[in-house]
Image (cartoon, rainbow, N blue to C red):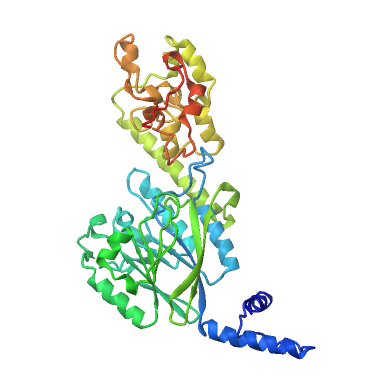
Amino acid sequence: MFDCIRDIERTSGDVGCGKQREPQRPRFAFIAHALLLCGLFGLLSTPLHAAQLTLVYTGNLDGELEPCGCSAGGDLGGIKRQVHMLDRLRAKTPDLIALSTGGLIISEMPQDRLKSAFILSGASALGFDAIGVQGRDLGFGAAFLKDVELPWVASNLHGVAHVATERIITRGALRLAFLQWLAPDTAAASAETTLDADSKPLAQRLHTLKQQGVLTAVGTTLTLEQTRAILPLNDIDILLIKSKYEVYGEPQKVANTLVLQPGSRGMRLAQILLTLDEHGAITKWQHEVIPLPKEIGDAPRMEKWYADYNERVKADYQARVELRKKLTERASPYAGAKVCKDCHAQEYAVWEASKHAHAFEALETVNKAFDPECLACHTVGFENDGFVDSAMTKHLQHVQCENCHGAAKAHVASNGKARTQHHGWSRTQVCAQCHNQKRSPDFDLEKRWPQVAHGKLREPLKIQSNQ
């Protein structure tokens, strides 16, 4: 009987047992009887109003407009690929719902304001149905978020016209409400805004929505246990908790609540197909995490956006260069590799034969020789009294001796008596300045060390173990 039911579902497409297309006139009576029995069994075993819903969800882009392409392991994600993938998913499932728990931007470096503005316009192209507000999204003030019209949600943030307390998303007869709990300890209210630390109003609203037959989804930067302590899970159908670093967590069911955990940095998207019964409860799901390597390709419609971004970054860099030239009064503490060569010729020869000696050229190849995020690792002392631009400080291009050993002009002036700035650093500390999880996740220090070993540092690297 079960085989019969599966065969009917497989051959009738999206029409299940109990709602079959009118069959062709059967040749034998027993076929009609079998079909009738299958239909009756289907009516008894399948909810009359069962529905399916496809969600695409993400969280914590964390200011990653594009990936660092210096390593294969780190070359995942970026807004251009996200848009391309979402375009493909929507072509397949036009009525999917796309949610983000926020954390789109950061405000840590001088260039972050410009980059954040482009991230917001890029997010507009992603077409999210709702985006939660996190504390980091308010880094430039709540007013910064209104420059691009986006479906922001923060259920306990009041006084911001462009941020809703909830978003009701409708797909046919199904309604989904997305709400976001903005943890009070991660954001500060301003003179114009009020941040409610009391979760009771949100809990009451969730209960009302459930009574109205609305599917509820809540985003937060809290863990599952922290959320359970302040909100009633019995009124939450889908809970999107604090993002996991880079990779997505496995979905889990806690009573009637489906708990989802996005991955950070925009390196992947996740799609989940939900099946709901006649009461709107989630009965089963199919979950897929979608990596975004360069093979995914960039969305053609984002070409102008990206070109505009690069032009603005380049213009901003050039303006800051001119300002630094005017303000620079003290001498740079960096000497440059050619000065090191006078006393360390053999070591210089090893460096000159390495990829480090051509690091700036790699930026020129991909038209990124003006991006501060790239220059920080591909030049010496950028924004730290070192590299300014190719015209003024050409001798500080590439990854040189002082990237690893630290500023050495005082060392040179003292005929080697003064220590270099990073004297005493371990090899791990030195390399981790750039070869870290964010930029170079596949970096193997033990494997790579022989390629740059020189002088007293030629001995094999010994990885200590606590076993």
State the image coordinates of residue 203 (x, y, percent, origin top left): 27, 73
State the image coordinates of residue 421 (x, y, percent, origin top left): 31, 22
Residue drawn at x 30%, y 53% as measured from the top left: 139
State the image coordinates of residue 466 (x, y, percent, origin top left): 36, 31
Left or right side of 230 for 320 = right
Place residue 23 in its image quadrant.
Answer: bottom right
User: How many marks do you count on the picture?
Assistant: 0
State the residue in front, 252 or 191: 252
Tell me if residue 431 comes above or below residue 177 in the rendering.
Answer: above
Left or right side of 167 for 450 = right
State the residue in front, 273 or 131: 273
For residue 157, say whether it is visible: no
Quadrant where the image shows the C terminus = top left
State the image coordinates of residue 295 (x, y, percent, origin top left): 60, 49
Tell me if residue 64 comes above or below residue 130 in the rendering.
Answer: above
State the residue in front, 21 or 129: 21
